Image: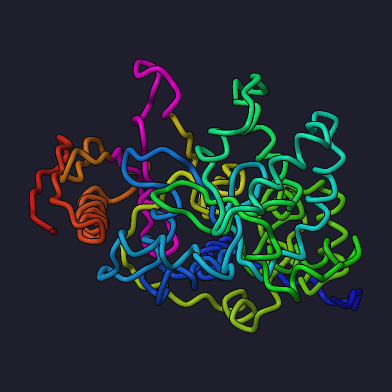
Amino acid sequence: MPLHNSPHHTIIVSPEAARHLAVTASHLPGQADEPRTVLRRVGLIQLDALTRVDRAHRLTCLARLPRTARAGDIDARLWSRGEAISFETYTHAAALIPIEDWPLFRLNRLAAAQRRDAPGGTELAAVTSMVRSSDHGLTLARIEETAPRAGGDWDWSESKRITEHLLWRGEVVSTDRRLNRRIYDVPERRIPADLRDSVPTRAQVLVGLANRAIRSLGIATATDVARHYNLVPADAGFGLEHGDALPARVEGWGSPAWLSPDPEAAAIAASPEPIPEDPRFIGPFDPLIRDRDRSRRIFNFDYTFEAYKPATKRTYGHYVLGVLVGARFVGRADVRRDGRVLAVIGVFPEPGGNLAQFRDAVGTAAETLAEQMGLTLEIRSSTTALSTDCG
């Protein structure tokens, strides 16, 4: 991973081009061929246990896959029962990362080993030995059957606390899931040897993460890149300045920007072409809106996750999805799965938009997601009425 520091002219980017760059870098809706392509393109898929519609990683993939894709096929393409194709770790939240990026998280693993709240060496060694002695890895439930319980942080059992620390340190890995449960194994059985043995320097890690982030984001500030991988802003800035990103300035942004070095990005920055309008629902943990400050700045879309608010204090609903059309968020919809029904129970257009076009977009996005999930669709909002069987 060589370091670069070549001078470049600052590229002027319009707000419209910035929106196009963010969407195309993240993959155009419907254009990815399979889930693994989505993971490699976005670089990081946030994981979340809520299932009001479907799990967050499936929603992220479905937004980028064709209408013919099926939600039930996704997990088998993102995790592997043999040599790893991905691994789970933590940035600011649980995330799934392409396996080729394993060396770039070396600093995270070293930092985890130095945490003051780390369990004792005896306990760590005991759980590691237990995992290593298994044939194909262990679920947490199986580890807890024999490990002691003593109460730990966040009311976790002691065995869970130990196992999570081992995961952060890379001394056990999670590269497989079964029935939505992590399988813990040792890295020598799952991580390819060339990646496991790679020892990049601190500078190489920071440059590698910045290069990865700017290609996934398309255009970003140093703060955006820092939030993407939970870096210290100064470290993100170092990586950008010594990496492949191109200096840019976006009209209306208060901070300097960086542009992806991909030729496609330069073409979009110079003259953005219309993005095909394939309306899609975008989940709350999707890379396009998981950084709320960035989504406000780029899309003028102010998203707030309200699932943990009391119902009386919610503005839009329990589990609200953004409605993306081309490179614009035209509104949002409160969606839930009721058995074999995908129900849209509230729709909210952005101010100043065309209401008829918004209704059409919600209908199309809902039909696509219902078909991908094999559900019957019901739109129950008072602004429109639609019921169709997409199963």
Total label count? 0
* Residue 353 vertical placement versus 263 (above, below): above
Spot occupied by residue 130 in the image (x, y as percentages of width and height): 65, 45
Screen quadrant of the N terminus: bottom right
Q: Is 333 covered by the magenta stretch?
A: yes
Foreground of the two, 122 or 374: 122
**Colour mode of the rendering:** rainbow
Q: Is residue 306 visible?
A: yes
Question: Is residue 309 found left or right of 242 in the rendered image?
Answer: left
Question: Is residue 62 found left or right of 271 in the rendered image?
Answer: left
Spot occupied by residue 200 in the image (x, y as percentages of width and height): 87, 67
* Residue 148 vertical placement versus 387 (above, below): above
Question: Is residue 241 found left or right of 196 in the rendered image?
Answer: right
Q: Is 320 covered by the magenta stretch?
A: yes
Q: Residue at x 15, y 35 (%)?
A: 382
Q: Is residue 253 visible?
A: no
Q: Residue at x 60, y 20 (%)?
A: 155
Foreground of the two, 151 or 145: 145
Screen quadrant of the C terminus: bottom left
* Residue 276 vertical placement versus 177 (above, below): below
Q: Residue at x 68, y 63 (%)?
A: 213
Spot occupied by residue 236 in the image (x, y as percentages of width and height): 81, 55
Foreground of the two, 296 or 105: 105
Magenta segment: 307-335
Question: Is residue 8 found left or right of 286 in the rendered image?
Answer: right
Q: Residue at x 73, y 53 (%)?
A: 170
Spot occupied by residue 158 in the image (x, y as percentages of width and height): 65, 27
